[in-house]
Amino acid sequence: MLKVAVPNKGLLSESAIATLLEAGYRQRKDSRDLVLVDNSNQVEFYYLRPKDISIYVGSGELDAGITGRDLLINSSAKADEILALDFGLSTFRFAAPTGKSWKLTDVAGKRIATSYTGLLSSYLAKEKITATLVPLDGAVESSIRLGVADVIADVVSTGNTLRQAGLEVFGEPIIQSEAILIARPGVKIENSLETLVRRLKGVVTARQYVLMDYDCPNEVLEKACSITPGFESPTISPLRKEGWVAVRSMVLKKDIHKVMDELWSVGAKGVLVTEIKACRL
């Protein structure tokens, strides 16, 4: 039976559970449950702290897990990223008090507070920068005001917490993170694990795309298809009305209004958009 780790709390937990439910797997209803066995899919789910998941998977105790890319890198665990899941998006960045134009080179010799010492140590070594790391388990925004650090390096989603603390980000993002599916190194993607990957990939794709249907005259069909090339190619069917065809294509959800405007401008009519609940591509 496949053993899969799921975040038990925090920002990743709710979205991870929702994604697995959409993929057809059972999930716990009581947050106190530590293990759930889905016999119909031959999967055991273990609910663990997000920062520990990489360790359990990398050690071989579990086959796969959902965690953050930043947490995987910070752990130095021997686990491989298998699939990006397109939620839990964040950046890992430097931040310092407002009022000074900070540059990356300014962190040399400074005290940097962070909860991600492994990730930051690797980054600083790559950039050939020497600094003192101040390891904290959270709330690093307060470390500068309390005098234990000069700069912080932390996960940034909206930046509201930083602004409230009188801080601003500087430099390029150290890493772009999101929720990912990880697996033991060298594990074969087959059987239950292959099914898990395929189902999760279907959920991610279904969330990113919509189906767009429209009618258009034959003379503008090439233009219309260039606007909606689809995942592979559009589906085209003749209409009863002479010289017209119906077109169906997958379109990125973030582009639907732009695409609809462009289709209308070339002469397409009856443009409809439908949500995709699941897919296999």
Image (tube, rainbow, N blue to C red):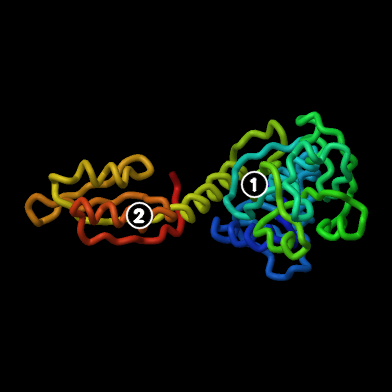
Tag 1, which secondary structure?
Answer: strand
Q: Is residue 277 left or right of residue 151?
A: left
Is 56 located above or below residue 6 in the figure?
above
What residue is disc 1 on? Answer: 180
Residues marked 2 and 1 touching at CB (< 8 Å): no
Q: Residue at x 61, y 45 (%)?
A: 192
Q: Label 1: few (<14), some or many (≥20) within 10 Å?
A: many
Estimate the x, y position of residue 27 in percent, counting from the top left: 65, 62
Name, please, the residue furthest toward the left.
242
Residue 26 percent across, percent down from the top left: 62, 61
Q: Which residue is mark 2?
A: 258
Between 85 and 147, the residue placed more toward the observer is 147
Does residue 65 sit above or below 121 in this rendering? below
Q: Counting residues from the N terminus, which is met first, the one under dot 2 or under dot 1? A: 1
Nearer mark to the viewer, of 2 and 1: 2
Question: How much space separates mark 2 and mark 1, taking CA atoms?
Answer: 30 Å
245 on left or right of 162: left
- Please identify the quarter of the rendering in which residue 183 is found: top right
In this view, the residue in front, 247 or 140, is 140
Whole-percent x, y for residue 250 in the image: 36, 50
Could you tell whether 45 is left or right of 89 in the image? right
Query: What's the residue type where badge 2 is placed?
Result: Lys
Q: Residues within 10 Å of mark 2 (few under 14, many from 20)?
A: few
Q: Amino acid at mark 1?
A: Ile
Which numbered dot is residue 150? none
Q: Is residue 60 visible?
A: no
